[in-house]
Image (spheres, grey):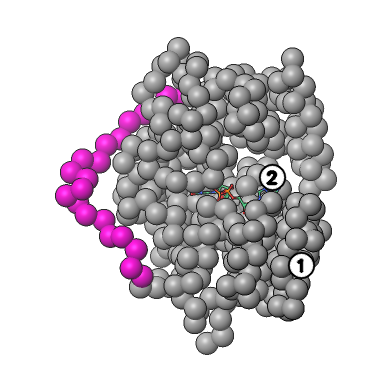
Amino acid sequence: MSKKGIAILGATGSIGTQALDVIRAFPNQFEAVVLTCGSNAALLIQQALEFKPKAVVVTDSLQYSYVQDALKGHNIAVLLGEVGLVEVVQYEGVDVVLNAIVGSAGLKPTVKAIQSKKDIALANKETLVVAGELIMALVHEHGVRMLPVDSEHSAIFQCLTGEEHNPIEKIYITASGGPFRGKSRPELRYVTKAQALKHPNWSMGAKITIDSASLMNKGLEVIEAKWLFNLSIDQVDVIVHPQSIVHSLVQFQDGSMKAQMGVPDMKLPIQYALTYPGRFENNFERFNFMDYPTLSFEKADMETFRNLALAYESLRAGGNRSCVLNAANEVVVDAFLKDRVGFLEMSDVIEQTLDQVEFIAAPTLDDYLETDRVARLITKEIIKD
Ligand code: NAD
Ligand code: MG
């Protein structure tokens, strides 16, 4: 059997490094053909020397010559920027593109990978938030697989295996509730980034950790699920489950519900996306019932955590609204991490941006890219004021 060639976009991040753990564990099945990073060139170099990919891409131009020098004589091509990303996803030896970039920067490489008939293992949920309708149309046109890496979507995907002809009644996306579950708006007004960065169950990149604290992550996941599983908005529900053991559920037309469960560890959904439809034996931690005598569930509080309501509203409005939501959110999260906006203000700024960006009912790829650009500028202006 020839090895499956994997291109890991965002190899130096939380998902990227865990994907390399999976590849390291199955050296006869998988090969890292391409590795890319934003600015963590030192780690990229270390990874490249270990995995010997055909090519690496670094997005930060200031780091380019450093990477080139370090990899000289190793027969590894070094490419730069978005141009490099859209080139390497087309390489012949690449079977799967694992997109673990953070933010809408992941959109163009995903589009190019699909057009080059590569299967996609998608961690970069922003791709589907920004342009879900367009992306799924491309997936069908080019006959590729869109394999979810996000744990909730992997759970639903696993529940649907063998159920291809059975319509879904609804899905429940579980949410841990984050570090501020149960808090009121007055209590949230002055929370710090250090508090928001302390997720109870998962260790992740900074942006998604803030999104988890504000419930925007769940909003983005609702949008991601709608497109991934071709559902109506009313078929996608969120349920808070603080233990993060039930990773999500599907309810079928006869009322039967299937859930996928396990300890919270992203390596499992990453591995499943790479081994699908098979399952490989591994030594990841197993679930112990005695550690979790109680699994509990509660309603999501959309009045306190308005981002989740805004995500539903954007999805309902359609067109370029979710693209605006995402762009505004990327900017406010960055500003929150730099102490320039407060925790609750993030929702206010996003809402104002949604009011100000022109509505486009049926956007093209260029429309999405332009919406993303304009929305970022408007959000930055609002924050400045
Ligand atoms: P991270 O910040 O840890 O890593 C991001 C990676 O992308 C890094 O390699 C970084 O160098 C690269 N990168 C950043 N900006 C870039 C840009 N503009 N262009 C090219 N590369 C860039 O993030 P993460 O937590 O690994 O998350 C990655 C994606 O996976 C996000 O979309 C996130 O929502 C999703 N996700 C993450 C987790 C998790 O447990 N971390 C779980 C589910 C989904
Ligand atoms: Mg998730």
Residue 69 — which label? 1
Circle count: 2
Q: Main secondary structure of the magenta part?
A: loop
Q: Above or below — where is 273 with respect to 298?
A: below
Residue 17 vs residue 129, the one in the foreground: 17
Earlier in the chain: of badge 1 and badge 2, it is 1
The residue tagged with tag 2: helix, strand or loop? helix
Q: Residue at x 64, y 58 (%)?
A: 42
**Region of the chain picked out in magenta, as a range:** 282-302
Badge 1 density bin: few <14, some 14–19, many ≥20, Cα 10 Å: few
Quick one: quadrant of the C terminus?
top right
Determine contact: label 1, label 2, CB under 8 Å: no
Residue 288: say if magenta: yes
Under circle 1, the secondary element is helix
Residue 280 placement (x, y as % from top left): 39, 73
* Other residues around mark 2 within 10 Å, as few (<14) / some (14–19) / many (≥20): many
**Residue under the point 48% across and 40% down:** 235
Position in image of residue 376 (x %, y %): 75, 32
Amino acid type indicated by mark 1: Asp
Q: Position of residue 316 (x, y in %)?
A: 61, 32
